[in-house]
Image (spheres, helix red, strand yellow):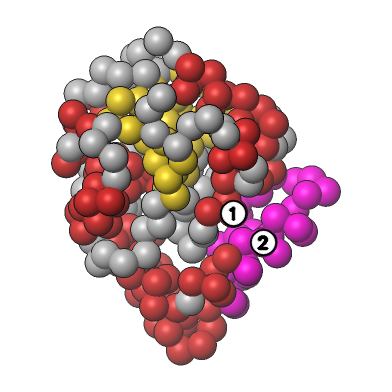
Amino acid sequence: MTPLVLIPGMMCDARLWGDLPARLARRMVIHAPCTEGETMAELAGLILAGAPPRFALAGLSMGGIVAMEILRQAPERVERLALLDTNPFAESETIRARRQPQIDRALSGELGNVMRDEMKPHYLAPGPRNAAVLDLCLEMALGLGPKIFARQSRALRDRPDQTETLSRFAGPALVLMGRHDRLCPLPRHEAMHRLMPQSRLVIIEDAGHLPTLEQPEPTFDALQTWLEAG
């Protein structure tokens, strides 16, 4: 059975995937945090260095962006690909302009405020799970710390466009998003689906940017279907 490599989003750890690994008890699951490299190329290279020769690959948000770079570097090693609430394009100038002020605030001791005020409120769909999910997001971020925030922010800021990478991939693919994702809205996922016409596009209702935490049941069902696809 092909191992599964899971890459979490920015300032998240393995808890982003909830009990998905437990549900896949017969499959080797490898958590691949993107915390050490300074660029997307370095982050992908470090994950590839520790990954099995061939694997299924799933990434959410920044994890999806790193997954696309892994696919660019070593397409022969990726058996199947799942991209969740992510973005295949290079950073927009508007978002690039925000990165350095956020980095400066985080490094000066305001990481909690940056996560709380500027980022996490835009992540989720309205609903009763919000408070608990946001608390977990903040806990994960503070556990990783401001230096990792700075490294990840710079890697995102300077990332390349990966549309050509996706257009060359012919394996089983899943493109999944929460209906209320404002960070990575529907047109970006439709674009990825067009680039990989063999992919399945799944929209999770009542979820925003983090469907693995907001609506785990339908999200994990979609991932299971993807893993079993021929």
Q: Quadrant of residue 115?
A: bottom right
Q: Position of residue 50 (x, y in %)?
A: 28, 51
Residue shown at the point (18%, 29%) measured from the top left:
76
Q: Amino acid at mark 1?
A: Arg
Q: Which quadrant holds the N terminus?
A: top left
For residue 56: magenta? no
Q: Which quadrant holds the C terminus?
A: top left
Determine crowd level at label 1: few under 14, some 14-19, many 20+ residues with C-alpha closer than 10 A: some
Q: CB atoms at circles 1 and 2 under 8 Å apart?
A: yes
178 relative to 130, above or below: above
**Secondary structure at numbered mark 2:** helix
For residue 133: magenta? yes
**Secondary structure at numbered mark 1:** helix
Residue shown at the point (56%, 40%) measured from the top left:
21
So how many labels did they put on this image?
Answer: 2
Q: Which residue is mark 2?
A: 136
Q: Which residue is mark 1?
A: 15
Instruction: Return the disc, 1 or 2, that comes first in the chain's sequence.
Output: 1
Residue shown at the point (51%, 58%) measured from the top left:
13
Residue situated furthest right in the rendering = 128
Q: For this view, does 43 lie left or right of residue 222?
A: left
171 relative to 116, above or below: above
128 relative to 39, above or below: above
Q: Quadrant of residue 181?
A: top right
Q: Amino acid at mark 2?
A: Leu
Determine crowd level at label 2: few under 14, some 14-19, many 20+ residues with C-alpha closer than 10 A: some
Q: Position of residue 119 (x, y in %)?
A: 55, 62
Q: Which region of the structure is painted magenta? A: 112-139
- Residue 25 seen in the figure: yes
Q: Position of residue 63 (x, y in %)?
A: 40, 48
